[in-house]
Amino acid sequence: MTARPQVDVVIPTSGRPSLAPLLDALEGFAQGEVIVIEDRAGRGPAWARNAGWRRSRARWIAFLDDDVIPEPGWAAALARDLHDLSPRVGASQGRLRVPLPSNRRPTDWERNVAGLERARWATADMAFRRAALEDAGGFDERFPRAYREDADLGLRLTAAGWEIVRGERRVRHPVGPAGRWVSVGKQAGNADDALMRRLHGRGWRERAGAPRGALPAHAATVALGALALVPRTRWIGAAGWLAATARFAWRRIAPGPRTAGEAATMLVTSAAIPPAAVGHRLRGELRVRRIARRPSPAANRPLRGELRARWIARRPSPAANRRPAAVLLDRDGTLVVDVPYNGDPERVVPTPTAQRALDRLRGAGVPLAVVSNQSGIARGLLDRGQVEAVNRRVEELLGPIGPVLICPHGPEEGCACRKPQPGLVLAAARALGVEPSRCAVIGDIGADVQAARAAGARAVLVPTAVTRREEIAAAPEVAADLDAAVTLLLAEGGR
């Protein structure tokens, strides 16, 4: 069997000219493969990075943006940065330098790009452990642009117990050309901020190290502009709008070169930015109401909008024409709210419809079992005693759940039991004395579906906020919640 390379480099690109010098700098890279994913269709960097790392076979995947240039010795520095890292480290961030003019003050756009030097978790140069990417499910493709998709992944990784460290390797990020209206176009990122707040709560900026942003001031400026359109408040609104716009423009002009062209650009765009920012934020708020629901510690809610349309089963499997002889259930995210690496029984909270679903299965005489990956044991975050204590608490709250089979291994160990491998499903079927083909598996992520199908069992996916679009698209049957999944299984012939 061919050994996996130590590290592959993945570069998402839309075909920009800056790609050529980057590839020249990587010539002779010997630690693995250089994988370039071209996104001509505009599906976004999150999609391109996911496509790249899923093609890779390496234990580490280093992402580089197509507009950076690794400094000499970058590959050797990368190897040193990744050498002997703790198993809890899920990512290593490189150091980014933005060269600015030495003969004049930087423009507004140049200062904007230079802000990347201080960005936390910027994927302009970020190496991820494969196990961490698999654990988090990769980048969230609901972020359509190069903005916040890296902060979202960083928050999910750190919440799951992974550490992100800073290495010593360095890349340069030259300031590329930009049009006069680039700052107005960048306001589209406010829509992504709406999704970040919905997914990670009000305090996400502090946890991600992101600046507070100017949206409140922009909203106030827009409100003053609206007052200027009302006859009774016309003069007050106009004076307030003019003062706020002038103040905003001067804050952008003062640190710059103060040339006539730069000043004119700042004046015009400072008037256009507030309504653009507010408009994009409102668009983002409407969008997240359709595509996401914020996870709550007390509930494991399904995604809304486009996922809600897929609640009823699609493309039934060959096994869907009869009632299953046994039902195997994933634990975290399916039976109970997912608390990453939970070893505390007091934190066990059943999902909203779990009790009714299990009562119906038990009432129908269907044997049950639980199949659960518990890689926290391999990572030293849990021990078996804690896992067993949590399992006992699940039974105390929900009643008998049958044999509980766990995989204690990490993703890198290559075992046959960790889902998406079929080992747990096959073992549970043996424990119940049932043929795997007569079993149904209910879970919340693609690994549950893949394990079921690899074992020849029927699979029903119950999406949650962490379920990826492609996992939903690939699932043979999808249900809104656990009780809806049981309805599918108990209905003769399915739907």
Image (cartoon, rainbow, N blue to C red):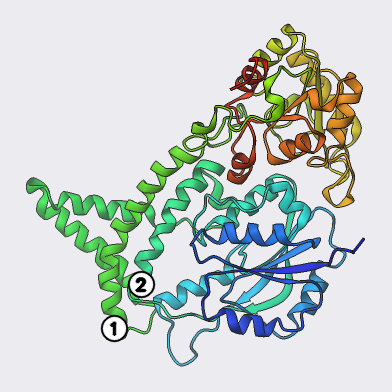
For the image, the number of numbered tags is 2
* Up/down of 487 relative to 16, above or below: above
Residue 85, quarter of picture: bottom right
What amino acid is at disc 2?
Answer: Arg
Q: Residues within 10 Å of mark 1 (few under 14, many from 20)?
A: few
Q: Is mark 1 on a helix, strand or loop?
A: helix
406 to the left or right of 333: right
- Between 242 and 296, the residue placed more toward the observer is 296
Q: Label for residue 214?
A: none
Q: Is residue 355 above or below residue 346?
A: above
Residue beneath disc 2 = 252
Work out whether residue 223 or residue 13 is closer to the camera in this orientation and state it: 13
Q: Which of the pair 399/190 is nearer the observer? A: 399
**Tag 2 or tag 1, which sits nearer the N-term?**
2
Kind of residue sitting beneath label 1: Gly
Q: Is mark 2 on a helix, strand or loop?
A: helix
| Pointer 2 local density, CA inside 10 Å: few below 14, some 14–19, many at least 20 | many
Q: Residue at x 44, y 38 (%)?
A: 289
Q: Which of marks 1 and 2 is in front?
A: 1
- Tell me, yes or no, if residue 388 can be seen here: no
Q: In this view, does 75 lie above or below 380?
A: below
The numbered disc on residue 261 is 1
Residue 456, horizontal then vertical, whole percent: 79, 33
Q: Nearer the viewer, residue 154 or 455?
A: 455
Q: Residue at x 83, y 20 (%)?
A: 392
**Residue, far bottom:** 103
Residue 79 percent coordinates (x, y):
81, 73
Image position, residue 349 (x, y; %):
69, 24
